[in-house]
């Protein structure tokens, strides 16, 4: 395809998008317009919070020392001693190449992917729920949530992993033929090359493709390329670091790392938290914390309480409904299943909600099974992304019936975001102010 | 009037994930522009957030009265007429800049280093100074950041290159808190 054709395609796409935006604004009620303005403030404010003074502190913070020197090693052509797959550190080395061995350099990829997550949430919300409004809601919720903001401001991999997983699901929802499946599988391979736990996205991706019924069953075999992609990425990394690049050496290295992770799971960590505390943000971590005299600068991973409380309540309500429909009303197993099916996919938003919930559950499930003393709140970030997508779709659905209620909900979420912005975006605070904002003792450092 | 033709672009299955890749590059470029525009490495020192060129900060420094002769820095840089008492080769500047323009390294109460000029000229420090270690509170007007600078903390000590960039500014209205 020539560059002229690409430019023309891009121009067509942009023109089409603009026409849809103006048409949607013209047809919206004053309440919906007010909600749109608040959502816009959330998105712009969220991006500003991600970028502002991201280079501070100028030295390592939290787990950055485990990754940054190893990312630098790729540029020096020496061994990566970290215990995770190499791609995240290779992304980081691009930042270091652009900005030098400097905090801006090593936080650059997390910031770029953090902003991309907002855009992906829009596209994915729109693809799942088939309305741009759901996409806008999801994008605004991701933008104005502290969990996502804090992971965009630090040289750690979980924000990047989450972004790649959303990207995988966008490809899965868009897939129509084997080519779409191949793109999804390539993206899964890339995500797994950032962090192994990303492999669980295969479950919602495959189920989504099957439920949407657009791709042939045999084409799902293409997911076999996932380990091939991971191997290719790893061999490239070994080549960059002047290590042996034969498959036997790679196998030995991977085995060593797996054993190391198994061993690590036996040790304990003061920041450890159990999976069932994650959805209620019982113990969010402050991943950037600096003290200067009487001033504190925090970047807390606590999510926006309006979002996670709403998402959790919906999850609990759904569970109660499921149990109630399965146990009450009489009839045989078929009648019960029919009632469950009606509840799950009866409403227009039923199937997309089911799919987003599947993403949420599939990425959380491994941590409910592998229970150990070495699990942390940030393992919940990818799951939480799907919870926010689900919430975006739900709120957009309810807006058609109760626009004023939704305006109040969005307004409240924005208000809470404004209150918590100082502890998400490292504003200069006195200790008592920070403690007042992080009022539950388990939220404090 | 002819109806307006609505162009409806429907992306295909490969376009959608590719669009995200294009977006990532655009975001990367945007962030690069912001970083370049912010000039964070020239205007923001590594020590404190919000310590930008042109800002005034209240600083609390720990001193002993001999520090006037003990503390010194060496660099060829001159910022806003302020420079170190020694050049990059650790030779004393000739002529030696006056007290209001000669930079010295100081530690604040968080043990972080800054370069300041004019402290010993302050009216609040002209009287008799305490014989023990004491703290002074000053207004610190930041005029820039120096990356390549060495500091000395003893009269005949060696100048050691600093590992991080340091803020440079004038210290005024210094008082010893009672």
Image (cartoon, helix red, strand yellow):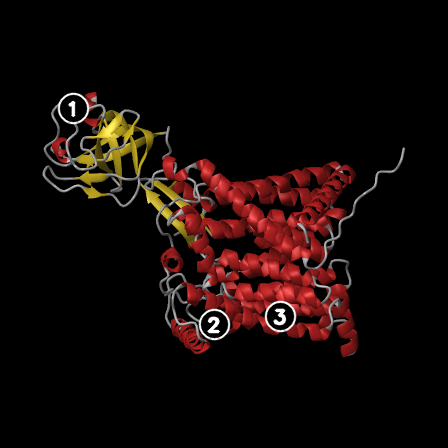
Hey, which quadrant is residue B63 in on the image? top left
| A193 on left or right of A243 | right
Which callout, 2 or 1, points to the residue nearer the camera?
1
| Subunit under mark 2 | A
Total number of numbered labels?
A: 3
Q: Nearer the viewer, residue A314 or B27?
A: B27
Labels 3 and 1 positioned on one and the same chain: no
**Depicted A286 relative to depicted B175: above or below:** below
Q: Nearer the viewer, residue A91 or A390?
A: A91
In percent of width and height, residue A416 lies at: 55, 44
Distance from label 3 to label 1 (Cα)?
Answer: 75 Å
Q: Residues within 10 Å of mark 2 (few under 14, many from 20)?
A: few
Quadrant (top left/top right/bottom left/bottom right) for the N terminus of chain A = bottom right
Distance from label 3 to label 2 (Cα)?
Answer: 20 Å
Q: Residue at 72% x, 47% y: name it.
A: A399
Q: Earlier in the sequence, mark 3 or mark 2?
A: 3
Q: Is residue A119 visible?
A: yes
In percent of width and height, residue B44 lies at: 37, 37
What residue does disc 3 label? A203
Hey, which quadrant is residue A321 in on the image? bottom right
């Amino acid at each position: 395809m020539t560059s002229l054709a690409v430019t023309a395609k891009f121009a067509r796409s942009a023109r089409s998008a603009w026409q849809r935006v103006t048409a949607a604004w013209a047809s919206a009620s004053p309440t919906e317009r007010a909600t749109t303005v608040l959502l816009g403030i959330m998105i712009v404010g969220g991006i500003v919070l991600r970028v502002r003074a991201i280079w501070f502190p100028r030295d390592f913070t939290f787990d950055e020392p485990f990754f940054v020197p190893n990312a630098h090693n790729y540029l020096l052509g020496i061994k990566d001693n970290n215990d995770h797959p190499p791609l995240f550190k290779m992304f980081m080395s691009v930042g270091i190449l652009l900005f030098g061995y400097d905090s801006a350099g090593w936080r650059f990829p997390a910031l770029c992917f953090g902003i991309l997550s907002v855009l992906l949430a829009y596209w994915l919300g729109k693809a799942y729920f088939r309305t741009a409004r759901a996409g806008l809601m999801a994008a605004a919720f991701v933008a104005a949530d502290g969990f996502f903001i804090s992971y965009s401001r630090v040289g750690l991999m979980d924000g990047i992993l989450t972004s790649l997983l959303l990207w995988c699901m966008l490809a899965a929802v868009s897939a129509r033929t084997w080519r779409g499946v191949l793109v999804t599988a390539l993206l899964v391979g890339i995500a797994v090359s950032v962090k192994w736990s990303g492999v669980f996205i295969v479950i919602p991706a495959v189920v989504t493709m099957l439920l949407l019924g657009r791709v042939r069953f045999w084409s799902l075999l293409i997911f076999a390329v996932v380990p091939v992609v991971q191997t290719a990425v790893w061999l490239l990394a070994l080549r960059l670091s002047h290590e042996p690049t034969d498959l036997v050496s790679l196998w030995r290295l991977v085995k060593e790392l797996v054993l190391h992770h198994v061993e690590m799971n036996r040790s304990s960590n003061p920041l450890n938290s159990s999976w069932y505390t994650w959805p209620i943000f019982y113990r969010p971590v402050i991943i950037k914390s600096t003290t200067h005299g009487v001033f504190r600068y925090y970047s807390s991973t606590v999510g926006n309480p309006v979002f996670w409380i709403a998402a959790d309540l919906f999850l609990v309500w759904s569970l109660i409904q499921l149990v109630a429909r399965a146990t009450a009303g009489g009839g045989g197993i078929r009648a019960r299943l029919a009632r469950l099916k009606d509840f799950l996919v009866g409403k227009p938003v039923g199937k997309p909600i089911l799919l987003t919930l599947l993403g949420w559950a599939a990425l959380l499930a491994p941590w409910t099974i592998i229970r150990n003393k070495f699990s942390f709140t940030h393992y919940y970030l990818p799951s939480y992304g799907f919870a926010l997508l689900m919430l975006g779709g739900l709120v957009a659905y309810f807006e058609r019936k109760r626009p004023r209620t939704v305006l109040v909900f969005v307004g409240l979420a924005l208000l809470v975001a404004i209150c918590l912005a100082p502890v998400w975006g490292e504003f200069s605070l006195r200790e008592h102010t920070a403690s007042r904002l992080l009022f539950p003792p388990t939220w404090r450092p | 009037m002819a109806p307006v033709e609505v162009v409806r672009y429907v992306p295909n299955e490969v376009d959608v994930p590719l669009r995200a890749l294009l977006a990532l590059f655009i975001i990367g470029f945007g962030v690069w522009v912001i970083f370049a525009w912010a000039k964070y490495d020239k205007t923001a020192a590594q020590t404190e957030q919000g310590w930008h060129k042109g800002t005034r900060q209240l600083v609390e420094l720990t001193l002993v009265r001999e520090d006037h002769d003990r503390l010194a820095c060496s660099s060829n840089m001159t910022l806003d007429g302020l420079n170190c008492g020694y050049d990059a080769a650790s030779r004393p500047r000739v002529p030696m800049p006056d007290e209001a323009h000669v930079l010295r390294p100081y530690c604040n109460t968080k043990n972080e280093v800054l370069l300041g000029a004019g402290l010993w000229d302050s009216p609040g420090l002209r009287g008799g100074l305490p014989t023990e270690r004491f703290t002074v509170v000053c207004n610190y007007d930041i005029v820039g950041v120096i990356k390549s600078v060495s500091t000395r903390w003893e009269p005949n000590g060696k100048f050691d290159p600093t590992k991080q960039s340091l803020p440079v500014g004038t210290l005024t209205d210094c008082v010893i808190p009672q």
